[in-house]
Image (cartoon, rainbow, N blue to C red):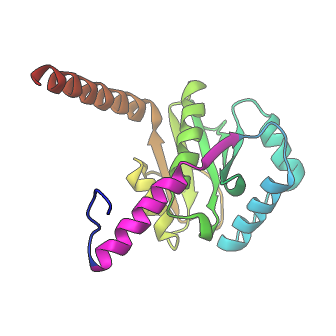
Amino acid sequence: MPDFAMPEGNKSQEYHRSTLSSLRADSVRIVRLVKSNEDAIRLLEEYYEAVSVVQRDTPEAIQRIIDTPGCGVWLAFLDEKPVGCVVLRRLDSIPLAGECKRLYVQPGARGFGIADRLLDAQEEFAHGLGLRWIYLDSHDGLKAAIALYRRRGYVDCERYNENPQATVFMRKDIETAKADAKAIADAQRRMTEKNKGDD
């Protein structure tokens, strides 16, 4: 007999799905590439097809992004299988800014927090470079992606590029977000220490 109670009905399925998601999330690994490879090209091709991208990067362009200081390509692995990607480009037209591009997670790997982990890695890298802003463009039909960006602190901004397919333009102040996250973590730590002292 288990020493915990299983929820009933639909809640049981939600509990199982939530438990499975957290177990699978432990199997996620994010890697910044130093050389383009077949996995990166395949995932980017899937992304282009999924959202009907017209302006596509060639394999040579991907390698140039990887080689350019201040830029990067990250892959996500779930159970050691490549399932997602994201790209960061420097924005020369805007001081202290980079651009988030090509965020993609395969449909079968969604629900495990992989998009968040990719964006975390990208933002950590950008912050380490001294960037303050990450910009992105999207299309208003990609409602789930836009909701993800808003949840992560992106706000609407003026058009900053000439992408003919983009209808939504956003940016995030990663310097302020990092400071806010640190303040929250410090407050939680202090509260935990206080609660231990009260015991």
Magenta segment = 9-31
Residue at the extreme bottom of the image, as rendered: 9
x and y percentages locating residue 126 in the rendered image:
58, 33
Vertical placement of residue 60 versus 44, above or below:
above
Residue shown at the point (66%, 65%) measured from the top left: 164
> For residue 73, which quarter of the picture?
top right
Residue shown at the point (19%, 27%) measured from the top left: 191
Vertical placement of residue 132 versus 37, above or below:
above
In the displayed structure, does residue 123 sit left or right of residue 197? right
Q: Quadrant of the N terminus?
A: bottom left
Vertical placement of residue 37 versus 55, above or below:
above
x and y percentages locating residue 74 in the rendered image:
69, 45
Residue shown at the point (61%, 45%) measured from the top left: 99
x and y percentages locating residue 146 in the rendered image:
47, 62
Q: Nearer the viewer, residue 72 or 17?
A: 17
Vertical placement of residue 177 versus 155, above or below:
above
Whether residue 137 is visible: yes
In the displayed structure, does residue 121 sit left or right of residue 40? left
Q: Quadrant of the C terminus?
A: top left
Q: Nearer the viewer, residue 96 or 122?
A: 122
> Principal SS element in the magenta part?
helix
User: Is residue 100 highlighted in magenta?
Assistant: no
Residue at the extreme right of the image, as rendered: 60
Whether residue 85 is visible: no
Residue at the extreme front of the image, as rendered: 1
x and y percentages locating residue 161 in the rendered image:
62, 52
In the displayed structure, does residue 184 sit left or right of residue 58? left
Q: Nearer the viewer, residue 32 or 78?
A: 78
In the displayed structure, does residue 80 sit left or right of residue 120? right
